[in-house]
Amino acid sequence: MEWFSAEGYEFARQVLQRGIAAVYLVVFLNAAAQFPALLGEDGLLPAPRFLARIRGRGIPTLFHWHYSDRFLLAVTWVGAVVAALLMAGVPQAGPWWLPMAAFLLLWGLYLSVVNIGQTFYGFGWESLLLEAGFLAAFLGSDDVAAPVTILWAFRWLVFRLEFGAGLIKLRGDKVWRNLTALYYHHETQPMPNPASWFFHHLPKPLHRVEVLGNHFAQLVVPFFLFFPQPVASIAAAVVIVTQLWLVLSGNFAWLNVLTILLACAAVSDAAVQAVLPEIQFAAPDAGGTPAAFAVVVGGVTLALLYWAWAPLKNLVRRDQLMNASFNRWHLSNAYGAFGSITRHRDEVVIEGTNDPPGPQARWQEYEFRGKPGNPHRMPRQFAPYHLRLDWMMWFLALGSYGAWFPVLLQKLLAADRRTLRLLRRDPFGGRPPRWIRARVYRYRYSTPAELRRERVWWVREPRGILVDPVEGPGPGRIPS
C-alpha cells in the first residue's frame, strides 16, 4: 500500500484534522447561541414552517424527523463535544474508522443545520466547511499515513476556492480590472474590524499594489499547489500570507481561517522543518495501511472525481456561478466572493421611542454587535465567530429586503428576550418601546483629522426612512 500513502505529510494531516475540528467547534457554539432566535420555533424565519414547505423534496436533514429548539440544541452540543475531542486528537489515537466516524458525524449534523438555515445560512463558507469536514473524515488515524488522494482533494478544494474567487473578480466589477477595488472595499465590506479604518487610509498606490497581489495570489499561485515540492509548499505559503492579510483587515467569519488550514494540505514535513528544524514528526508506517481503509478511500476518491466535473465546468463558464452547490450534500461546490464592490456604505439603523412620533420625539438606537452604528464606536473583531444577523443587516442596506426584517421589528416591539440577546445594546432595558422605525444612513470613514478632533470612526448623514414608525402594544411591560 505504499503507493496509497502520502509520506512526509504528517504536519498537514494534524493541522487539517485538528484545525477543521476547531472550526466545527466554533460553528456549533454559534448555532447554539443564535439559531433559536433566528430560526427556532418562534424565530425570525421559523424552521418548522420551512420544513413543512420542503417535505418530500429530498433535502437531507435530521430535522425532517423532528424539530424543536431543544433538539436543535442537543444536536449542536453533541457536535461541539465531538469537535472538541477531535481537536484534542482523541479519536485519531484509535483505529482508522474512529476519526472517520467522528468527522462524518460532524458533517452530517452540520449539514442538517445548514439545510434548514435558509437565508441566515446561505453563505459560501457553510459549504466550504461541509466539504472540508467530509474530506477530513478520510485522512486516517495516527497509525496510518494520510492517503495521497485525499490530500490532492484538499488541494483541489483550495484551487477552486482561490481561482474561482479570482475569476469572479475579473469577470465582475471593473474596479478589480483597473486595480481600484480597495479604494472602496475596506470601507464598504460587510463588517469592518479594528484595523479596517487604517487599511482604508493607506496610500492609493499601495491599494493598487494590493489588488495586483490579490490577482497573482488567486489567479496564478493556485496552479503551483499541484507542483512537486518545495514549489507546492511555497504556493501554500503565499495563500496563507494573503489570507492572513484578510484576517487582519476584516471580519469574514471562518472563511480566511479555514482557507489557511486547507492550504496546509500542500505543506510537506520537510518544508516545515526547513523553517523550524526543531520540530520532528513521527512518520506512520506507510506499509501498514489496512486494506479496508484503502478500499473506503478508493471509493470516496472515485466519488470526488465524479463530483469535480460540475465545479470544473463552472470555472470556464462566462456566467460563472458564485457560492453554488451542485449536489444536496454540499460536496460539489463553486466558490467566490466580492465579484462586485459597492462604492458607498449605507446602514439601516433601528430606533424606538415611547413618545408620539413627531419632531419632538426622542428616538433611541438599538446597537448591533458588529455592524457600524454609533460613529464613536471603534469596529470590533469577531471572526471566526459569525454574527449572522449583522451580516443580514448589511445585505438589507444593499436592497435585499427579506421576510425576516418585519418580524425582527415586531420582536423588538415586544422586547423578545432571545432577539435582544443578539444585539449589543437595547436602549429600553428589556422593556417594549411604544414605537419603532428603521432609518437609512450613509456612512463613510472619518478622516484622520476628524478622528483626532471628534473621536469618531464614522461620519454619517441621514438618507431616508426604510420603515415608517410602527406602533406596539405599549411600554412598561416586560414580557414573560
Image: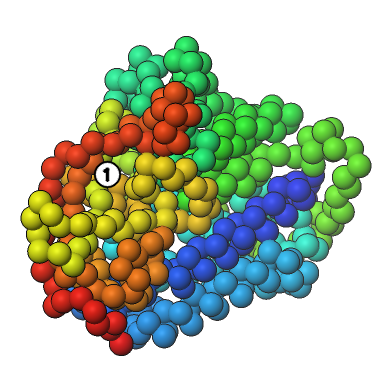
Q: Where is residue 75 in the image (x, y as percent from the top left)?
A: 48, 78
Query: Taking 64 as reference, is 324 above or below it?
Result: above
Q: Position of residue 426 (x, y in %)?
A: 34, 65
- Amino acid type, callout 1: Glu
Question: Based on the displayed image, in which of its 4 quarters is residue 22 positioned?
Answer: bottom right
Furthest-front residue in this view = 360
The residue under the point 21% across, 70% down is 433
The residue under the point 16% across, 70% down is 434
The residue under the point 45% across, 36% down is 455
Element marked by disc 1: strand
Query: Taking 7 as reference, is 27 above or below it?
Result: below
Query: Taking 383 as reference, is 78 above or below it?
Result: below
Asked if residue 20 can be seen in this view, the reply is yes
Quadrant of the image containing the C terminus: bottom left
- The foreground one among 32 and 430 is 430
Quadrant of the image containing the N terminus: bottom right
The residue under the point 67% across, 48% down is 148
Furthest-right residue in this view = 278
- The foreground one among 362 and 82 is 362
Asked if residue 405 can be seen in this view, the reply is no
Query: Taking 74 as reference, is 359 above or below it?
Result: above
Residue 147 lies left or right of residue 390; in this view the side is right
Neighbour class for label 1 at 10 Å: few (<14), some, many (≥20)?
A: many
Residue 185 lies left or right of residue 76; in this view the side is left
Question: Based on the displayed image, in which of its 4 quarters is residue 167 positioned?
Answer: top left
Label 1 sits on residue: 347
Q: Where is residue 296 in the image (x, y as percent from the top left)?
A: 60, 64
Q: Where is residue 441 in the image (x, y as percent from the top left)?
A: 23, 41
Residue 54 lies left or right of residue 240; in this view the side is left
